[in-house]
Each structure stands twice: as C-alpha cells, then as structure tokens.
Amino acid sequence: MCAVKNTVDPWVARRLGLVRTQSIASEIRLNNCLSNDDNLILQRDEHFYAQLDALREKQLHYAIQRSTYYAASGYHQFSTVNWQDMPLISQEILRVQHLQMVCTSSSNIDRIVTLMSSGTTGDPKRIYFTRSDQSDTIQYFKVGMDSFTTPGDKVVIWLPNSRPGSISELLAEALKLGGKQPKCYGVMNHLSSAYKQLMEETPDVIVGIPLQILALAKYTEIVGTPIRIKSVLLSTDAISDTVVKTLERLWHCKVYRYFGMTEMGYGGGIECEVHNGYHLYESDFYIEIINPETGQVVPDGTWGEMVITTLRRHGMPLIRYRTGDVTRIIPEKCACGSNLKRIDRIQHRVKDTIELLPGQLLTRNELDDHLLTLPSLLDYTVQYNTNEEEKQLIMTIYYLGDTIHQDEILEKLHQLKSIHDAVCSGQWALEINFEEMLPSSCPSPMKRTICTSK
Ligand SMILES: [Zn+2]
C-alpha cells in the first residue's frame, strides 16, 4: 500500500476548474494509490495556462480597483502579456505602504499578522487577511497534510498558538476536517516539557519548527527513550538536509518539508514522496525567479530570488513581491508524475549571507549542514564585525549534555572553504563561544540569520 497520495494535483485542478485526465494518470506508477479518483494527475495544457492567466488578470484588476497603492503605481498599464515589466514590490515597500495595499474595509479584515525583521530596525511588515483568506489557509494545510497522513492519526503541533486564528489553530481545523486528531502545544519553550508531552501523547505525526524538533529528537536520544513517529512535517524558510536526515535516523520516520510564508497565507507547496522540491499550489500563487541584482526573470533551473504573486487574496493581494528567498524552479518533471511546478529547497535569504573574501560566500545552510550533525549541538548564532582592522566572525554554540568537543567544532568550521581561507588570509578572526543549553530551555523559534554584531 502506498502511504503517500497525490492530493495536490487534483486539488489544484479543481481550484482551476479543470478536469483531471485518466490518460495522464495511467502513465505513472504509484502502485495502488491510483485506485482512488483523487490520485489522478493534473494535466498541464492550454486550459491550465489559460486559467492561470485569467486568475492573474483577475487579481491584478481587483488590486487596482480596490487599493490606493496599486491604483497609483501605474499597474493599469500591465497585463499577463507584459507581466515581467511590471514593478516589483520590495520588502521595504511592504513595510511602508502595507495599509495602502489593503483592498477591503477594516471591518472585513479578520486577522493582521505583524512580522518583525530579525537583525534590522525599522517598521515591521504587516499582512492583512479576510475571513475568506483564512479559509484558504485552512485549505492549504488540509491538502498538504492529507498527502501524508491518514484519518485517525494523532498530530502534535508545536507552532505559534497564542492568538485566535493562529497558525496552530488553522492547522488544527484543517486536520479535523481530514479526520485527524490534532493537539496544539504552541511554540516549544522547554525541551523537558515537550518531551513529557511527547511521551503522554505518543503522536503518529509531529509538526514544528526544524531546529526545535531536531533539539527534541537529540534530547530523546540523550535520555535514551526509543520514539516511534510515523512522519514529521517541518516548515520555515530554509530546512537543512542535515535536520531531515538526523530526524529520519533518530526517529525512523519520514520527514516532509512544507513551504508556506506568512505573506502567502501559509500556502505555497509541499514535498511529495520523492522529497525533491516543493510542488507549488499553482492555483493560488504565481512564482517567478529573478536575478536579485537586475530584477530580470531568469530561465527555469537558474538560482535566484523568488517573487510571488497571490492569485486569490482578498485582504491584501501581493503582485510580484520580492521574498528575499533564494531558490530555483526545477525544470525536470518530478518522478512522482505530478505536473505541478516545483521549486528547490530554499537556499538562504538574499541578505542572509556574508562574503568573507571576494567571491567566497558563507551561508547559513552550509553552517547547518556542517554543524547540526554533531549530537550535542542544538543551536548556534553567527555575528560578524567588519569595523575593526581585523574583521571578526563571532559564533556562539549552544550544546546539551556534559561534553562538547571544541576541537571538533573548529575542525568542522575549517572544512568550510570560505571560513578556512578567510582565517588563513589573516583578514578574519574566528571567535567561538560555548553555552550550555539546559532542558528547561530550547532553541529559539525565530528565523536564524547571519547578522552584524553592531
Ligand atoms: Zn513529486
């Protein structure tokens, strides 16, 4: 029996008003998963592109008619024909002009999410959602979770849960619609409490923030308790392969990555059983990849900055919004048979890298891949200072348990060419601090960045 169903293709097809075709479905082999009508594969044909174009035009017209920002910024000159010439919305524009982008009266706004930017100062980003936008979010979660869970599954959620309409609440609602049993614990604050909750609930599925779930898995390993989990779903902007492989090894589970930014109403895409990129919710989002320097769209397969356009948003449509995330559209068709576009694993944010020497970039993903393999290392921070004559890279390593082998960490860091060359050149000093993380604490839920120490 195949454990994973293709739920996303038929869902996108229905959202686009298209009919699924048996002929395409019969070309692929998903064992007996194809016995269910819902496993049929979306056909990517002229009807598909026509529907997508219609949605883009509709969202654009809606935004121009209802928001002062889109009305005043020359958007009426554009359509799907000259789409790539349309202005891009930077994160700075969103920060300053969010109110002008709202397309409905305040009484119709059901939820406002405020995003503080870590490592920077200035106005926060604010994203506005109507009730129908929130209903769409529930659909995004349902179609994603239905692809790898089954009715009756117990699902423990460690995600933000402090306000009505929170991400946990919407996910729980989606799970209930699919016949699952959700339990929300909010963001993880203490490893020891999360461990107790894990023991009490014995869930089939866990949903959470990558570094927090990884820390919990390492903690269960140190405590010595064998854990049986069917699947884990991780969601943030960048999820290291090391996190996925370590969880699979420690818990003997399948790990799925979900791609869903707040700006997208937590929709976006999900991995299939092939685990090679996110299948996009194309009925609701139009994704482009641009060269971050020139703003020009790059060919499929080329790495660049992801730009999103919402296609069904009522509260605050975003037309060509620069996410700052670096990824690429995978040009090859997925081995699972789906015809949906895929984007690759998010590499890093455009600003979340540091060029130590000319042409030698250090990214957070590289550091994750190298450092998180160490059993007792739970988290780390990276800061840099370029004001002094000798530039400084300052790392703080958070570890659990009695021992941390400092030489091993130093060796791991020197395996990264950018760090090795920078230190050997005499231009950079590497400072490493060590701090024990107690079971009464936990890695931060915030997105980690490489940031300046000033
Ligand atoms: Zn696939």
Image (cartoon, rainbow, N blue to C red):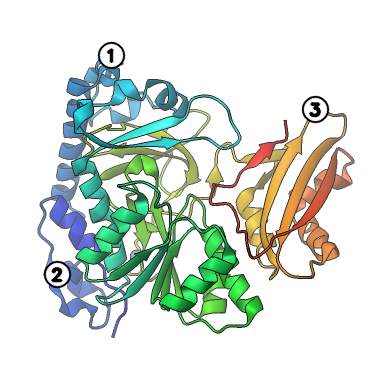
The amino acid type of the residue labelled 1 equals: Ala
Please name the residue shown 47% across and 25% down the image. 92
Q: Position of residue 93 (x, y in %)?
A: 42, 23
Task: Classify 73 as above or below 320.
Answer: above
Mark 1 highlights which residue? 72
Mark 3 highlights which residue? 387
Say whether marks 1 and 3 touch (CB < 8 Å): no
Q: Which mark is residue 300?
A: none
Q: Is residue 14 or residue 130 the one in the foreground?
A: 130
Task: Classify 124 as above or below 188.
Answer: above
Q: Point out the frontmost of discs 2 and 3.
A: 3
Mark 2 highlights which residue? 23
Real-space CA distance between mark 2 and mark 3, rounded to the nearest whole angstrom = 63 Å
Report whether residue 15 is seen: yes
| The image quarter in which residue 403 lies | bottom right
- Mark 2 or mark 1: whose residue is earlier in sequence: 2
Real-space CA distance between mark 1 and mark 3, rounded to the nearest whole angstrom = 42 Å
